[in-house]
Amino acid sequence: MAEFLDREHFIPVRSADLVSFLCEDTGPLHNQALTDDEQAAFRQFARCVVGHVHASYQEEIRQLKETYAAFDPDADPKPLSPPSPAEREVILGKLFDTFVHLMNRANYVRLTRDEMEKQMAGASEWGIDMDVPWDAFVKVEVFYRGKGFGKRTKHHWLYRWRKTDVKVPTFGRVAVIFKQKPHKRLGTDADFQSVFLKLFKDIPQMDIEMLLPGGRIKMPKLDRLKLGGSLGSTVGYVVWKLWDSVSSIGTAVLTGSVMALYGPVVLIAGYGYKTWYSFQVTRQTYTLQLTQSLYYQNLDSNGGVMFRLLDETEEQEVREVLLAYFYLWRYAGDHGWTIQEIDDYIELDIERRLKMNVDFEIGDAMQKLVKAGIVTEADGRYRAVPLVEAQTRLDQLWQRYARVE
């Protein structure tokens, strides 16, 4: 079973498109196309899989709603009996654990604190370096899915009227969950009781810190050098002139030298102020640009993030189950396939026909199929039950679920 460090488990195909893709499959010999009856039966089977997976998530959705209710800043109505401080601590831990589990199932990649700091070192061609106050959070987690490249427009460094397109490494999706605590960077009006969830798209990898509150823009090294040089030059010039005057004879000479300092000191200090003011203008411009950009890159917030991610998790599970069953049903025959053979065939076929590099998560899919009785396992080899029988077993599962409800 091949594992690829440069691939993700996420399958970037809609379930409806995947069903059509599979129904059009002609096999490795290009003469094994499904008949019209087989296509109709498989489409019916796929609809039942979608319904069964969705039904299995209903309890999870209810639990998530209850867990998040006490921390949702947008909750309407609010809970009638808010939990006590001690209960809130327990629920908070459960909420973060549930979210991490959900992100793993949705095939997102978790970024640790060390990975975040390494990722945020410097700034992209489009962004500005920022400093994140990690001590402003009680808890914070960041996840991404899908690495790629995007384009950003940038002014030429010399010919400011010219614009050039810059290729920037991006994350296709970034999810953030955090709870704040009192901190000078956040101000006095910040919400320290709620847990915030944010979901973004197409975020430059080096600028991921801009998604966290309390970030402070760092002055670029060149500007710091200019400002430090101006300050150093001013102080040095003043000290030198005063020392020279003290070494000379008479107070008049000292007084005259002090008066003579006025012009040069004002000139050097003015240059330093210009550098500082230019940075302030740059920071305000970037803040406005950041606000405008994130307006279009923000996909969802708070409770909406939970439901969107649950939907993505359902979709992903449906894709995995359909792919695993289809290839076993069509090509493994009575001899069956090992889990490695199934995994390799699916990955190679997706790469060959859809030009997508995917690290298929075969283990989870096979566990679900075996548990449902749709696939059998003996001596390490897996075999799919016929499609008609598989449909019958799905119907039985649905009836069993309905009786439990």
Image: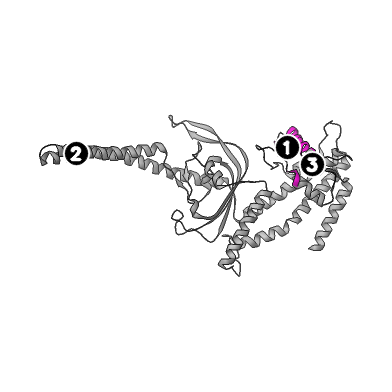
In the rendered image, residue 125, in percent from the top left (x then y), is placed at 50, 36
Amino acid marked by disc 1 = Ala
Amino acid marked by disc 2 = Trp
Name, please, the residue furthest toward the top: 159
Q: Please give left or right for residue 59 compared with residue 238 in the image.
A: right
Picture quadrant of residue 195:
bottom right
Mark found first going from the N terminus, 1 or 2? 1
- Residue occupied by mark 2: 243
- Measuring 26% from the left and 38% from the top, which residue is drawn there? 236
* Residue 228 appearing in the image: yes
- Measuring 83% from the left and 59% from the top, which residue is drawn there? 400
Mark found first going from the N terminus, 3 or 2? 2
Q: Which mark is residue 73?
A: none
- SS state under label 2: helix
- Measuring 20% from the left and 39% from the top, which residue is drawn there? 261
Q: Label 2 near label 1: C-beta < 8 Å?
A: no
- First to last magenta residue range: 341-363
- Residue occupied by mark 1: 2
In the rendered image, residue 98, in percent from the top left (x then y), is placed at 65, 56
